Amino acid sequence: MLFAYALVLLFAAVAPCAAKDTGLIFVSNEKSNNIIVLDPKTHAVVKDIKTSRRPRDMHFDAAHEKLYVACGDDDVIEIIDVAKLAVIGKLATGSSPETFAIDEAKRRIYVANEEASSLSVIDMDQNIIVQEVPTGAEPEGVAIGKDGKLLYVTSEVGDLVHEIDAADGHVTRDVVVGTRPRRFAATPDGKQLWVTTELSGEVYIIDLASFTVAGKIEFLPPGMRKSDVTPVGLAMTKDGKTAYVTLGHAAHVAVVDVPSRAVQSYMLVGKRSWGITMSRDEKLLYVANGFGDDITIIDARSRKPIVSIPVGRVPWGVVVDD
């Protein structure tokens, strides 16, 4: 049960910067229905952007001129002007959009609709849904294959990962994974897809050529119970050597050596660690702590937290304009 409490945000007199390379930190907050924008140096609040209800997943366009935000309770993706730090438009989706992926080359947005059990395909130029693809119950994670020809979608209830032909929208193959699969990270060579399975407490590794399970990784931070380990967020370095996994109620981030699949260490963060992202230079990690109403910034080299910053209520995700 969530206990609501008032959070007073102190707004610094910091003017919005021009789009791209600002370093601004954007945090989506499910229960306060806003995007908190933080200054990267002072960590002061630059802007509180009001959104539709239940903002969750966020992605920039290639130019970082627009930030797209899935708002689950109003069935829309809102578009934020990154320079103006203001909502400038909305795209209709299916029921309860949670995560999505953008294919700039094809001008498509692929949206997992949790309550509709479907994947919406949105034309970015016309701003309309051009196709609906049926999926297993409660889809969440969405990933685009390396060549853009295949899509991958998790079904939380079905414990499945779907492979979908992007051209015709048909499911071509399924693979069974652990309980309640959530989100993805692909290896840079495009040969493996890693997926977090929240309720079985694991990361499953899928070989994309055979579309079979090639292995799995289990987690248990010191002093935690196995039942607390609920992996959700996943990020992988560009060289494919290191993966970072948020462990939900276990309040840690796991550091995994990708080639050996060995857990190297655990980093303590906030309550219900959820979304995770890296700075472009991969020196910093940003973690949204859903039940802590804050984010944690981590030094990736030392693997130690630098600071925790209060944000809105129930932060879901975090992205950085760098």
Image (cartoon, helix red, strand yellow):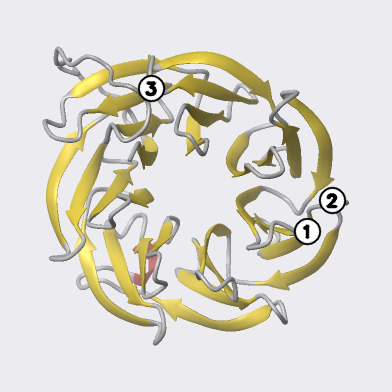
The foreground one among 54 and 163 is 163
The foreground one among 114 and 18 is 18
Q: Looking at the picture, does residue 154 appear above or below residue 114?
A: below
Whether the residues at callouts 1 and 2 have beta carbons within 8 Å, the answer is: yes
Residue tagged 3: 32
Quarter of the figure that contains the C terminus: top left
Q: Residue 236: give its label.
A: none
The picture places residue 69, in percent across and down from the top left corner, at 52, 30
SS label for mark 2:
loop
SS label for mark 1:
strand
Residue at 68% x, 61% y: name it.
Answer: 147
User: Which is more N-terminal, label 2 or label 3?
Assistant: 3
User: Which is more N-terminal, label 3 or label 1?
Assistant: 3
Amino acid bearing label 1: Ile
Q: Is residue 104 something one can see in this rendering? A: yes
Residue at 34% x, 75% y: name it.
Answer: 256
